[in-house]
Amino acid sequence: MTLFSRKRPRSSDAAQRVSQEPFTTDKPSKHHMLPTHYNNGRLVTKGIQQEGESGRSGFNPVHFCKVAWRSSCRASMFLNVLWPFVPAGIALYYSRRESTLLVFAINYVAMIPAANLLGFAGQDLARKLPRVLGILLETTLSAVVEIVLFVVLIVKDHRDGHNVAVIKAAILGSILTNLLLCLGCCFFLGGIKRHEQVFHEAVSEVGSNLLLVAGFALLIPSAFYSALHSSAFGPGDEVPTGEDGRPQEVFTLTRLNHDILAISRGTAIVLIVAFILFIWYNAKSHDTIFDDVLAADQEKDVDREHDLSKAKFTLTECIMALAVSLALVSIIAVILVNEIHPMVVEYRIPDNFMGLILVPLVEKFAEHITAIDEAWDNQMNFALFHCLGPSIQTALFNAPLVVLVGWGLHNHFMDLNFEIFQIVLLVLSIMVVGNFLRDKKSNYLEGGLLVLIYVIVALSAWYYPNPSLTTSNSGATGIDSH
């Protein structure tokens, strides 16, 4: 029986053997004892999984362009029509610097196809590796856009704290976009064709528990500051004196800001340790559990035969696609970062809306298309990995990383002291999503509700004033002296 046969095997184990075991019609001989072809006709390459086998080697420009154009799915392929925006955006930045809105808008759109190529090349490379290792690598590569944006923002901050407000909002906005918008679209579009969809508790429980821990850790510095800020003495406050006429020892805002910075940096290190434990848990100690879950999901893929037969990148082409897309993403990220502050000042776009909504949407767009396509094909465990995994990486690695980079740059504004409005949104969203994941089932109603919550968040972010006007945690924006 071939892989493309419509007749189903007697058991799922048999199906898995058929899909994974190489097959050849050549008779074995003493000079040729190992199979040379999979049963889908592709050549066997040592160390490459069947799902990622291209049947070719090296680099072929024609095949490279064809595969890149077709991308991972039809929706992703449509994003490739935006490629003309990439050279146009870069050229416009260097030729018409005075047109802030036009430069920002063109490069904002240009980030989508560049990030789409990065995500597709990462996905193709992940399919050549063992399932768990592959999806972890794909999640890490998809976070490169976010890391580049954060690092460029903190480097360009010039120690005045203007970009820090956007970074902090973007950290939480990235998590909210994955949990509410992306997961909501997965539940909604996947549930349209089916009464309900099911997923494994190994994916949902580990993901929701880690996010709850991350939300708690990110909440602590903000709660610490809010609890003590009202009683702390500022530079202009009169310090009480004792009976001997000497000034009493008081708790000052300077000390509070110093403590917040120390707590944030210590928390960042702890969160990175938690992220390493998460990677070890997935890729090493419990990899067989997740491998079995993802293998079962592949069997449920309604497009599995098409995915196995379509053209793929070679390993060399994957590396070249990653290099090109990374270079373009980095260039566009620098341009966007340079235009963010003028956009906020000239067009009065709130910092919270820029960070919570606009920046996460463009950096996660291609990844969201991949997750939604998987949910549409009934691969809910893969879709959950692509929704929860990036959220976990942002909370446990990307956010702590930018804090440590700020530490190295002596930027005293970059801490984990978020606006109370932002951190409350995050914790409540984690609790809502965790409750929806508890029964290990999803439907279009739950998805629609998550998307509606995201719309409410976006509406609130638009009307939330900039930190320069009013703030719940003034130390978070550098208004008070550190």
Image (cartoon, helix red, strand yellow):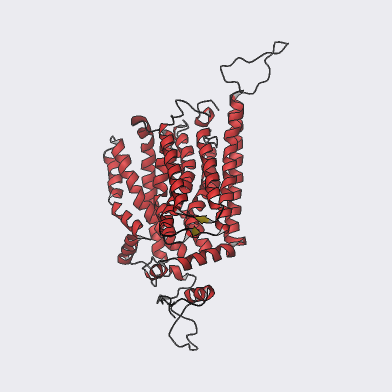
Camera sees residue 147: no
Q: Give the x, y percent position of residue 220.
A: 60, 37
Q: Which of 403 and 409 is in front in this view?
A: 403
Label count reads 0
Q: Residue furthest front?
A: 195
Identified at 42% across, 41% down, the residue is 455
| Foreground of the two, 212 or 68 | 212
Task: Spot the residue most to the right.
Answer: 244
Dividing the image into 4 quarters, which one contains the C terminus?
top right
Q: Taking 442 as reference, is 242 left or right?
A: right
Q: Is residue 310 above or below residue 393?
A: below
Q: Which of 91 and 366 is in front in this view?
A: 366
Quadrant showing the N terminus: bottom left
Q: Where is residue 425 in the image (x, y as percent from the top left)?
A: 51, 39
Q: Give the answer, above or below, for where 237 lies relative to 135.
A: above
Vertical relation: 217 (above or below) 371: above
